[in-house]
Image: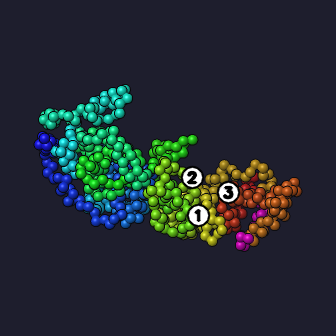
Amino acid sequence: MNEKYRELANFIFPNINEKIKDLEKKYPERNMQEGEKVTRIAPSPTGFLHTGALFTALVNKRISKQTNGVFFLRIEDTDTKREVEGAAGTFINELNSFGISPDEGIIGEKTETGNYGPYYQSERKNIYKICAKELISKGLAYPCFCKSTDSEELRSFQEKEKIRPGYYGKFAKCRNMETTEAIKKIKNGEEYILRLRSKGNHLNKIAYEDKIRGKIEQAESDQDIVIIKSDGLPTYHFAHVCDDHFMRTSLVIRGEEWIASVPLHLQLFEMLEFNPVEYAHVPTLMVQDGNGKRKLSKRKDPEAACSYFLETGYPILAMIEYLLTIINSDFELWRKDNLDKDLELFDVKLDKMNVAGALFDIMKLNDISKEIIGRMNTETLYENAKEWSEKYDSKLQEKIISDSSYIKKILGIERENVIKVRKDFVKYSDIGPSITYFYDEEFQEDIKDGYVFSEEMKKDDIIEILKEYIKELDLNVEKDEWFNNLKTFTDKLGYSSNMKEYKKNKELYKGSIADVSSVIRIAVTNRKNTPDIYSIMKILGKEKVIERFNKVIDKK
Ligand code: GLU
């Protein structure tokens, strides 16, 4: 009985002499202690790292790190149609940028490290062939000659008849083909694929323990799935089982879209006589869309590509903190109590993970990011902005290079030793547009279309305030004194420096100190909101401030 299968296996793979037991020796079990987890991330080289993949990578990295295990990167490049040149390099660079570098596997586009490689699936064909050959020789896999038109016909028939779809049981046409006939067809040059001869029964249930979701029960798989495609490359399912076995992965942490395939994967492990891996399926990142939620999608959401966060200049820490809040809801509380601690000290717990579609909320990320930039000291912010702009913002880079001490003063406004830190920068790309008024050329450009004075403010009053303030302005005093002087000035001009009093008796005044300072602010910056105007004027210097006042006076 076995002889005919062995013959078929030898006929299909005449040059494959190694056996699974040889691979077991070549890739021995790792020398890991109890509880140390070997995890991995296995992206397909489609050209960009999805934010969801970054999220999964972070969980994998954390679990391996926490358990003193290993985290490796494998590239799943068996779908040649979807492959993009140089994609692996992009992945590595992006993972490294987010501090999620693998310990093993692909660590650079052309560099790999570790004893369980090669780590590009396209270079592991031999391994898949050895495994497939062994399955064929045991009668557990067979060549299938069905054409794509046959599969389409089958699909529409099953759909029409409302029968469970797939290639299984009586619908698996080639399953019972005599091996002699199969050999004849191959000799005739007919194209074929290899399929698993499933022994499963759909009416049986299997159960396993998902490390995130707990016990999951599903129907056994009875599908004769494709294991090797006509191009000789394996399908995801087959490659996953062969690779994670011979790379000695212990815990597969991957997206929840693979839950439905677990029965099949467990069956493959069993048929190949491998010990199964443990599984943990992370939730898909969702976004709010109207009243509903949908998947974070590359087509619709720029933030679906994690390069977006690098390009727009979110601090890496903000992104990691934010992802940790999605991973474990108790992270936020921990963070509040441990503001200055390293994030690595927070233990990620798989069984505490939220499983009901994780909402990716950019507003929340922005809040975290604002806080983080707010807490940076000037020097750190300066260095980060410098590094970021070198790559992504040549205009800002020029400003930094041409006068670093000037820009440090600007970045230092309301930072360090202040009660309320400024929170107007969410990301480094916010810096350039919000500091234009410190640079004459950009300020000129900005006032070309006029000033943003409120309509209610009379032209003559604006001119009067500025003309009079030119006479009074003294920047050689501390902020408190400057502010007291401004109050005196306000009262002298017939405005009220006391907001409470003003609100009670508006008719007695021309306006309030808010109006006066708004005129000053707009004349200097042409913005209604800025950080502390005293600091801004100090940095610009009295001469420039007066020049700007005069510009308004001349224009009006
Ligand atoms: N290449 C698969 C993907 O990108 C990997 C899934 C897994 O982690 O096993 O979805």
Q: Which mark is residue 374?
A: 1
The spot of residue 298 in percent (x, y) is 45, 45
Q: Is residue 114 left or right of residue 6?
A: right
Dot 1, how many residues are within 10 Å of its Cα: few (below 14), some (14-19), or many (20+)? many
Of mark 3 and mark 2, the one earlier in the sequence is 2
- Classify 10 Å Cα crowding around label 3: few (below 14), some (14-19), many (20 and above): few
Question: What residue span does the magenta drawing correspond to?
Answer: 466-480
SS at badge 2: helix
Q: Are marks 1 and 3 in contact (CB under 8 Å)?
A: no
Q: Look at discs 1 and 3 and give the one toward the viewer.
A: 1
Circle nearer the N terminus (1, 3): 1
Instruction: Name the residue beneath numbered marker 2.
Output: 363
Q: Secondary structure at mark 3?
A: loop
Q: How is the image coloured?
A: rainbow
The mark closer to the camera, 3 or 2, is 2
Q: Is residue 262 visible?
A: yes
Determine which residue is flagged by label 3: 529
Dot 3 beta carbon under 8 Å from ligand 1: no
